Structure formats: C-alpha cells, structure tokens
Image (tube, rainbow, N blue to C red):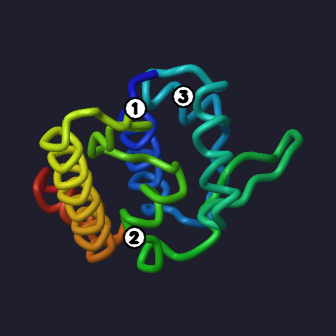
C-alpha cells in the first residue's frame, strides 16, 4: 500500500462518519464505499481506534464509529495516529567520509524536520467537521 493511501482512506472515512457520528459502520460498508478491501479498512481504522479517534464493536450489530465529535478530531490527529510521514526523512543516514556531505545531510535533515513540524501544525488547524462542511458546500449538498 502506498504510504499516503492509508491517510487518504482514514480521512475519507472520517469525513463520511462525521455526517452521522453515532452511526455504526462496518468494515465492509466502508471498504465498498472507498473501493478497497475490508482487511485494509480494519488495519487502518485499528490505528485510529488505538489513538482514541474511533471505537469499534464486534458482532452482528458491530462496526466503527467516532469516539469524539468531528469538531474535536483534527487532520493532525489522524496523521499522527497513522504514524505517517509525508516528508522524506532519509531514514538511517550513513556517516559520510566527506565533511561537506556530512554538513549537507545534517542541514537537509533539519529542514525536513522543520517542514514536518510545520505540516503537523497546519493539519492541527483543521477539523474533520470543517472538511465535511467544506465538501458539502463545494458540491452544493
């Protein structure tokens, strides 16, 4: 699975759940709507449950629902729950023999870390409820 497709699935699902936050939705329903497999849905939404964004119940009447109001869930909450990183961080860097390359790697890593912090701050300024409202306004719903 592509790195950002988990984030897209999670945000899309929460955006729809925000319309009826108390309604239980099954993995199969979510997967059908999102065009993916229920196993993928359970894996992604399981991370959101671990972060306290969703609750789940097993059994015939079970499924997933929001654990908090859509006004209390930010895009950053979702991003962090999935342990995503949209900014390439370079992973484990080798210690180069060249001093110029060493300084360059450190500078680039610092810039990337700053971009990641900025991204999270900006994501934290938008809630799932705001996204849903904007989506409905844009489509005249």
Please tell me which residue lies in front, 75 or 18: 75
Q: Is residue 135 left or right of residue 19?
A: left
- Which is more N-terminal, label 2 or label 1? 1
Query: What is the secondary structure assignment of the residue under circle 2?
Result: loop
Residue located beneath label 1 in the image: 3
Q: Residue at x 64, y 58 (%)?
A: 65
Image quarter in which the C terminus is found: bottom left
Residue drawn at x 63%, y 63% as measured from the top left? 51
Q: Does residue 39 sit above or below 126 in this rendering?
A: above
In the depicted view, which residue is nearer to us: 76 or 119? 119
User: Contact, CB < 8 Å: mark 1 with mark 2?
Assistant: no
Mark 3 Cα within 10 Å, few/some/many (few <14, many 20+)? some
Which mark is nearer the camera, 1 or 2?
1
Across and down, in percent, residue 60 comes to 86, 39
Figure check: 11 above or below 55? above
Q: Nearer the viewer, mark 3 or mark 1?
A: 1
- Choose the circle earlier in sequence order: 3 or 1: 1
Q: Nearer the viewer, residue 38 or 29?
A: 38
């Amino acid at each position: 699975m592509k790195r950002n497709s988990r984030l897209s699935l999670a945000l899309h699902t929460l955006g729809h759940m925000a319309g009826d936050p108390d309604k239980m939705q099954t993995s199969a329903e979510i997967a059908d709507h999102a065009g993916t497999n229920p196993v993928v849905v359970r894996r992604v939404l399981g991370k959101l449950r671990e972060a306290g964004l969703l609750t789940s119940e097993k059994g015939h009447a079970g499924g997933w629902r929001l654990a908090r109001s859509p006004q209390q869930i930010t895009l950053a909450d979702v991003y962090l729950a999935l342990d995503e990183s949209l900014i390439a961080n370079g992973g484990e860097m080798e210690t180069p023999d060249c001093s110029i390359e060493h300084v360059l790697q450190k500078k680039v890593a610092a810039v990337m870390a700053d971009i990641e912090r900025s991204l999270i701050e900006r994501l934290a300024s938008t809630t799932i409820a705001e996204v849903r409202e904007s989506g409905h306004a844009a489509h005249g719903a």
